[in-house]
Image (cartoon, rainbow, N blue to C red):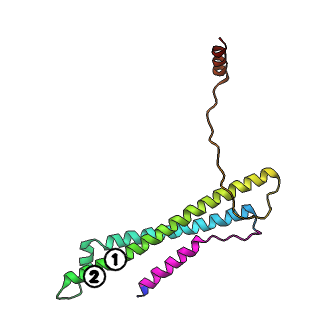
Amino acid sequence: MTHFAGIIFRLVFAGLLLSVTVPAQESRPERAANLRAQLAEIQGKETELKTQLEQIEEQIKPENIERSLAGIGSTHPEELREQRRRQLEIEKKGVQSQLDTLAASRTRLETAIATADAMSYQSLGQGSSSGPSIGPVPAVSIPTVTAKTPRSHRRRVKKRVRH
């Protein structure tokens, strides 16, 4: 049961990561740095969980289940193998669930970082870079850059239009 308690603890902890809290008096650059630190932490946890998932996928192969139960004597070895396979499947689902939760948190943090950066740049343009953060930050759209037409081509087009 301790393994399942560990899974439950990780799920609760991952749920806590979803609620990103930032103090209201924190400046915009500090907020972005804080969010980046949280993002790095989540990416580290994702790496650990991916490694754990790979290990479980290796253990779940029939030949590895067979090998892990080689020293255990039983009149029904097929039942033991099936029980071990089910246990590994449950672990795998738990780890995958944690990865999904962390991926959602990572996406939210990346969006929050982009928004905080945009608000920081916007406040730099207005001359007040250290004002308090107020409420939710609106989404900012970034304009796409298009290639300009050379002047010589524009003149030719204008001449053709006049005739």
User: Where in the figure is residue 59, as x and y percent of width and height?
Assistant: 32, 74
Image quadrant where residue 70 sits = bottom left
Which range of residues does the magenta coloring cover? 3-25
x then y, percent, for residue 139: 65, 55
Q: Position of residue 22 (x, y in %)?
A: 69, 70
Main secondary-structure element of the magenta-colored stretch: helix
Front residue of 69 and 130: 130
- Mark 2 packing: few (<14 Cα in 10 Å), some, or many (20+)? few
C-alpha gap between disc 1 and disc 2: 9 Å
Q: Residue at image x 44%, y 68%?
A: 50
Residue 83, disc: 2
| 120 horizontally vs 8: left or right | right
The amino acid marked with disc number 2 is: Gln
Residue at 34 percent across and 77 percent down: it is: 88
Q: Residue at image x 50%, y 81%?
A: 9
Q: Is residue 83 magenta?
A: no
Residue for badge 1: 88
